[in-house]
Image: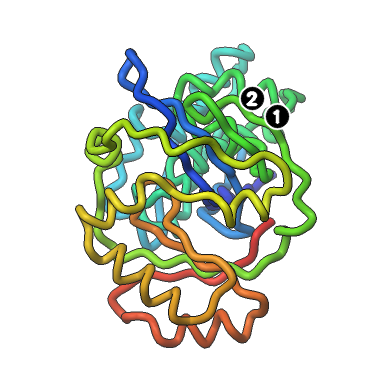
Amino acid sequence: MEHSEIAFAKLNLALHVRKRRDDGYHDIETLFAFVQDGDVLTACPANELNLAIHGPFGTGLEADNNNLVLKTAFLLKAHFGVRQGAAIRLDKKLPIASGIGGGSADAAATARLLNRLWGLEASEQELADILAPLGADIPACIFSRPSFGSGTGTALTFLEDSNIVARHVLLVNPLLSVSTAAIFKAWRGMDGGGVHRGDIWDAAVKGRNDLEPIAAAICPAIADILRHLSRANPVFVRMSGSGATCFALFNDAEALQTARATLDPEWWSMASALR
């Protein structure tokens, strides 16, 4: 029997960089939100573990042991002593390395998928703890719920989300890659203060993405997208993660589609809603 999972795209409604750590990572505070759409993973029982990659952004991705989907599968197989394998298929619908979860969301969806396929009966928290060493965004992506993240982003507090669920969201990416490592390295070390605690929407509006001006300086197309989206009268515009994906929230689907119709045809876009 085949099972499927959506790797819900991740958005950072706010991302405040607080300090550079001795281990080379950064302490951050962020507001995670998730989109109803994303990459799609399917799996069915098999004797061995294998991965096939398809979709508009599948070209160039290797289905080898360095792929986070297979890393996740092998880690769960070893942790729970699973004897069977799985034939996994990744339909890569989202741009690669674009600040919206990418491999982390795929890894999280793989964990949820194999948890059902293999009957592991693991809790989401257990999966998050097991997979945290593979990537800082993976725990948040396991839950795919609005949350406050601190430390490297793995310490999560779930937030009351009634005022953001189902908000119309337009994601836009210039199809230009930016280096997360280079962007964090360019951060000047100025702590602009933490994320406001309380209502998630209020905190998002009052917040910022400290990596946004850095990424826009490296990739001017990001600034072009942010300006373009701002002119479409959205209720909220920001870059997600370290870029290059930007997003705008709208009050209704008609306003979103009007904005989408004016985008540069060279840009990738996706219309969805927050979950």
On screen, residue 31 above or below 131: below
> Residue under circle 2?
127
Nearer-the-camera pick, 17 or 154: 17
Residue 55 visible in rendering: yes
| Image quadrant in which the N terminus is located | top right
| Image quadrant in which the C terminus is located | bottom right
Categorize mark 1 by other alpha carbons within 10 Å: few (<14), some (14-19), many (20+). some
Residue 203 is situated, as x and y percent measured from the top left of the image, at 63, 49
In which quarter of the view is residue 120 placed?
A: top right
Nearer-the-camera pick, 195 or 73: 195
In which quarter of the view is residue 76 placed?
A: top right
Nearer-the-camera pick, 267 or 90: 267
Q: Are marks 2 and 1 in contact (CB under 8 Å)?
A: yes
Which disc is residue 137 wearing?
Answer: none
- Residue depicted at x 53% and y 80%: 233
Q: Is residue 159 left or right of residue 267?
A: right
Which disc is residue 124 wearing?
Answer: 1
- Residue depicted at x 25% and y 53%: 177
Label 2: element kind:
helix
Nearer-the-camera pick, 176 or 106: 176
In which quarter of the view is residue 18 placed?
A: top left
